[in-house]
Image (cartoon, rainbow, N blue to C red):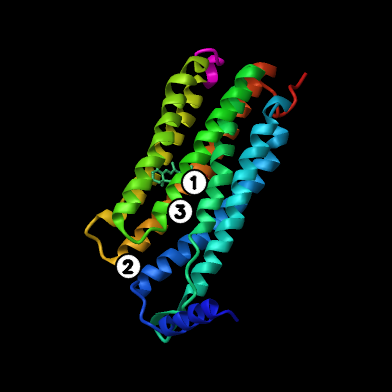
Amino acid sequence: MTSEAASGAAAAVAQSGGEATLSVFQYLLVYNAFSFTFATMAAATLFLWLGRSQVAPAYRTALTISGLVTAIAAYHYWRIFESWEQAYSLQNGVLTVTGYAFNDAYRYVDWLLTVPLLLIELVLVMRLSQRETTSKSITLGFAAALMIVLGYPGEIADDNTTRAIWGTLSTIPFLYIVWQLFVGLGKSIDNQPESVRGLIKQARLLTFASWGFYPIVYMIPYTSLGGGAVETGVQVGYTIADIIAKAGVGVLIYVIAVRKSQAEYGSTYGGEPARA
Ligand code: RET
């Protein structure tokens, strides 16, 4: 063992057994939220992938990607759940820290993969021209990755000034995405079939509302809440936002794809064959 590793291990031992800043209730609330989210993401994956046969071939890629987003999230929530369990020990009603740090990186790695995919899924369901689909997917995907990469150093920073600096930098690509969703994609919405225009606007609004939730959760450490409440608020807040942004938007994309298939290929598409 190197001397650095040895002192790291010593620090972990010194810290282990110490009382947690979280209350037992807060610990269990986060524990149950992670467990519930794993189940939701896994179930959404099955639903979205099985739903592929209900839509026209042109929309199957959108559903494949929606299911990939929830599958990647299910895996990460499982890892996050395990990391949470490992970081604390609950015995005889007393919560202590074990010395293993809770790993927040799983969340950011998850976003790095899923946020660009979510944007691509929204572009795909619009079925724009091939050139527009490619260019929008690349620019939006790149901006999304940049937003996440810039947010991470702030998330793990101990002081609130560093958090604010990285948070502000991350907001620049965030605003670019919002502007693209509302202005850039606004024009193509007018070219969509009548029956889905409202639904696409709803998907865009749900995307915007759920995405707007993340920077708000990021700012919880600036409130006057205590340490345990901040940690609980951040974990539960991101978890709720993830369920809406991934499983919620995914199901809405599925409904749009079914409606568009029916509008373009006849009202019986994916349903019962018409009777003679
Ligand atoms: C950060 C840092 C602070 C500033 C901003 C942020 C935005 C995060 C967003 C995350 C979206 C994640 C999604 C995940 C679902 O798969 C990084 C918190 C603006 C918008 C949609």
Q: Spatial distance from mark 2 to mark 3, Cα to Cα?
A: 17 Å
Badge 2 or badge 3: first in the primary sequence = 2
Query: Secondary structure under badge 2?
Result: helix
Badge 2 or badge 1: first in the primary sequence = 1
Q: Is residue 191 magenta?
A: yes
- Foreground tag (2 vs 3): 2
Residue 116 at what x, y percent from top left?
Answer: 56, 38
Outermost residue toward the right in this view: 276
Q: Picture quarter containing residue 206?
A: top left
Work out which quarter of the rendered image holds the N terminus and state it: bottom right
Q: What residue type is labelled 3?
A: Thr
Residue 107 at what x, y percent from top left?
Answer: 51, 54
Residue pointed to by mark 1:
149
Query: Secondary structure under badge 1?
Result: helix
Label 1 Cα neighbours within 10 Å, binned few <14 / some 14-19 / many ≥20: some
Ligand 1 rendered quadrant: top left
Query: Image check: 170 left or right of 58?
Result: left
Query: Which residue is drawn at the image coordinates 45% and 51% (left, top)?
Result: 152
- Foreground tag (3 vs 1): 1
Q: What residue type is labelled 2?
A: Gly
Outermost residue toward the top in this view: 191
Label 3 Cα neighbours within 10 Å, binned few <14 / some 14-19 / many ≥20: many
Residue pointed to by mark 3:
239
Residue pointed to by mark 2:
228
Magenta highlight range: 190-196
Residue 55 at what x, y percent from top left?
Answer: 68, 29
Q: What residue type is labelled 1?
A: Val
- Contact, CB < 8 Å: mark 2 with mark 3? no
Query: Which residue is drawn at the image coordinates 59% and 29% (left, top)?
Result: 138
Work out which quarter of the rendered image holds the C terminus and state it: top right
